[in-house]
């Protein structure tokens, strides 16, 4: 069993650093290459420990086994934190972009993350349904008036169909447009 | 989501298990002396030609490993320089002029993990951590709330990551209060993430 030079766990930490540097509005694709290298290191650590335990019956290997074990646990922690942080990001996207994420974010999500996102959507919807259909992503700011002026691009409304062309102004119910304002489609002109 | 998963995992894993800050803080290198020989791990130390790490030899280990091994009494740790007595005395004299960021990026986070390692000076370090924070706190609060039009780059540079965050929260809350006073808080703005990703898209077009 051979290890590359350098301290154990450094690749795992560079995985964490990479995501740490990533700006909050972006999601980079999973660094599978680096992940594989971390997994390879973990397998090597595990195998080395296993063979040391099997071969030696005296106690002289115990410190080395502990050292490798701590590295193994540290690697696991880094990988789990990496994946968890990605999910945290995706959760935040749900609240900022709505139930359908923009294409450029979706392409960088893994299949599992997409499944998780769908489940998150579903449980959020179920929860809101249990509150008699109250949309908890709305009215995050106390409304002063219920009508709002705005402008934006072509969009259709539920019920009536309104042409929202650029620079046109409309009075819309807050419930119809808060999402669109959050997404940056419309601009709140103030009232 | 975080609430339910937190209570399930309570007590099994530490609270900051998934925290990036905590992981990065534990990257701090600690000088250690091996009390037991590590067989077959000589390659970890590039300056070592031996196949094994013999007991008594010195090596720098990352904090996560050093603290694990020190608790098992396989290694003895030395405090990193910013936490030693000389540095502690400087902090005690006037903590507000010290550039913590340059010394240890996560000064407090690393420090709180450090004091769990068995070391005779640990009680002093923990007292020093609290005193340092208290000594610097007032200046951070003051400058983040009252110096809005001044260049604070110089002062901010000296703050450790945690303090920088505190400064930012403070600055933001003053700004929000200001907005509220100007009756601008009831305008719904696009979310920050969306604005940022738009800017990026525009940059790519041109």
Image (spheres, grey):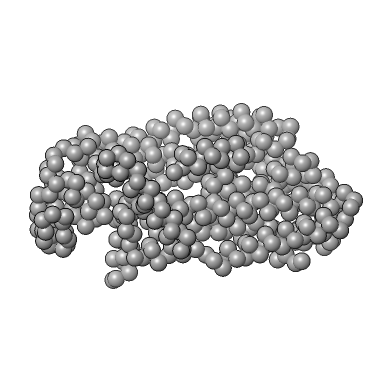
Residue A182, position as x, y percentages in the image: 26, 51
Q: Is residue B111 visible?
A: no
Depth check: give the residue in front, B173 or A179.
Answer: A179
Residue in the image at 63% along x and 62% along y: A39
Compared with residue B140, is residue B203 higher up or lower down, i.e. above or below? Answer: below
Q: Which residue is located at x 36 percent, y 65 percent? A: A104
Q: Quadrant of the N terminus of chain A?
A: bottom right
Q: Position of residue B88 (x, y in %)?
A: 63, 34
Q: Using the image as rendered, state which of residue A120 and residue A165 is in the foreground.
A: A120
From the viewer's perspective, tell me whether residue B135 is left or right of residue A52. Answer: left
The extreme right residue here reads A58
Quarter of the picture containing the C terminus of chain A is top left
Residue A125 visible in image: yes
Q: Residue at x 46, y 42 (%)?
A: B2
Answer with left or right where residue A172 lies relative to residue A58. left
Residue at the bottom extreme?
A: B206
Residue B86, image x and y in percent?
A: 66, 36
For residue B63, side relative to residue B35 (left or right): left
Residue displayed at 54% across by 66% down: A32
């Amino acid at each position: 069993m051979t290890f590359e030079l350098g301290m154990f766990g450094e690749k795992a930490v560079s995985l964490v650093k990479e995501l740490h540097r990533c700006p909050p509005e972006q999601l980079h694709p999973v660094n599978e290459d680096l992940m594989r290298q971390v997994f390879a290191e973990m397998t090597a650590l595990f195998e080395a420990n296993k063979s040391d335990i099997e071969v030696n019956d005296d106690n002289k290997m115990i410190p080395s086994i502990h050292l490798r074990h701590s590295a193994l646990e540290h690697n696991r922690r880094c990988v789990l934190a990496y994946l968890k942080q990605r999910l945290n990001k995706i959760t935040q996207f749900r609240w900022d972009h709505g139930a359908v994420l923009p294409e450029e974010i979706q392409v960088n999500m893994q299949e599992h993350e997409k499944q998780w996102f769908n489940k998150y959507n579903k449980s959020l919807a179920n929860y809101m349904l249990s509150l008699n259909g109250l949309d908890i992503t709305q009215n995050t700011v106390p409304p002063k008036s219920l009508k709002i002026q705005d402008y934006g691009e072509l969009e259709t409304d539920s019920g009536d169909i309104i042409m929202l062309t650029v620079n046109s102004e409309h009075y819309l119910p807050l419930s119809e447009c808060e999402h669109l304002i959050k997404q940056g489609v419309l601009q709140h002109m103030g009232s | 989501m975080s609430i339910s998963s937190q209570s399930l995992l309570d007590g099994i894993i530490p609270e900051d298990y998934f925290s990036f800050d905590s992981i990065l803080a534990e990257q701090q290198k600690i000088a250690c002396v091996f009390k037991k020989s590590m067989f077959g791990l000589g390659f970890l130390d590039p300056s070592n030609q031996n196949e094994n790490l013999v007991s008594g030899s010195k090596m720098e280990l990352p904090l996560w490993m050093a603290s694990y091994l020190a608790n098992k009494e396989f290694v003895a740790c030395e405090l990193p320089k910013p936490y030693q007595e000389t540095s502690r005395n400087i902090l005690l004299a006037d903590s507000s002029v010290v550039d913590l960021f340059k010394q240890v990026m996560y000064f407090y986070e690393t420090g709180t993990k450090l004091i769990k390692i068995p070391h005779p000076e640990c009680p002093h370090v923990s007292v020093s951590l609290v005193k340092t924070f208290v000594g610097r706190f007032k200046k951070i609060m003051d400058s983040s709330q009252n110096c809005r039009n001044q260049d604070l780059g110089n002062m901010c540079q000296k703050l450790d990551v945690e303090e920088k965050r505190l400064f930012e929260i403070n600055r933001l809350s003053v700004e929000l209060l200001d907005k509220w006073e100007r009756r601008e808080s009831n305008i719904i703005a696009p979310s920050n993430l969306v604005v940022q990703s738009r800017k990026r898209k525009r940059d790519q077009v041109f």
